[in-house]
Structures are given as C-alpha cells and as structure tokens.
Image (cartoon, rainbow, N blue to C red):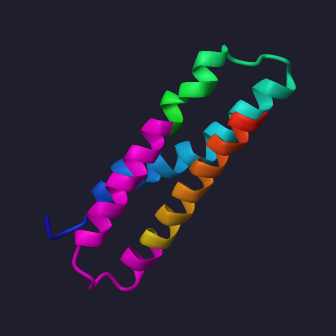
Amino acid sequence: MDRFSRRSVLTKILPASLIAIVLPAYANSETQRGKTPPREVVDDQPHMQSALDSLRNAKRELDQATSDKGGHRVRALRLVNQAIGEVERGVRYDRRH
C-alpha cells in the first residue's frame, strides 16, 4: 500500500499512540490505590504487548508509505518511535515495581 491516508492514521496510529500513553498512567494509578493486578497479568502484560504490536505495525506502514507527505509521515514516524519507547519503558517499570 503506497498511500497512507488520513483515515488509516486516525484508525491505526492515533489509537495505538493513545494506548501507549494511557495504559502506563492507568496502571500507575491502580497501583497507587492499592489495586495491584494479579501477578500473571503484570508478568504477561498482554495489553502492553498488543499496543507494541500495533505501534510496530504502524511503523512498518509508515516506512513503506511514499515520502511526499509534507513532513507529516516523518513526524508520525518520530511520534510512533517515541510511543514504542514509552510502552517499552512502561513494561520495564511495571516489571520492577
């Protein structure tokens, strides 16, 4: 797919980015309230893994898109990479605490 449409950005990248931002904050707030999830959920972190998978897929799609997007594709790639890093840091944080 050579085109990366506005619709695909709104349906793939934006939700994945929001998940990457919201989930670590939500997990932290639950822990602070004493509602620590069961250990197997913390160890596996299926939602965080799903977010990583979605973000990595979005990155692949952006990498394959044509470059003539007025700088928006490059900016989206930077934001997706940043979101991947945040999710990975969230997973590491959760495993230590």
Measuring from the top left, give residue 61's x and y in whole percent: 27, 62
Verify whether residue 71 appears in magenta.
yes
Residue sitting at the far left:
1
**On screen, residue 95 above or below 86:** above
Identify which residue, 39 or 61, lies in the foreground. 39
In which quarter of the view is residue 10 placed? bottom left
Quadrant (top left, top right, bottom left, bottom right) of the C terminus: top right
Picture mark count? 0
Across and down, in percent, residue 12 comes to 35, 50
Side of 69 relative to 83 (left or right): left
- Residue ID at (62%, 37%): 23
Q: Please give the name of the residue rendered at 40% of the width and 84% of the height, measured from the top-left corner.
A: 71
Report which quarter residue 67 is drawn in. Answer: bottom left
Q: How far across and how far down the image is residue 91, in percent? A: 62, 41
53 drawn magenta: yes
Image height check: is 24 above or below 32?
below
Magenta stretch?
49-75
Look at the image and tell me in which quarter the N terminus lies.
Answer: bottom left
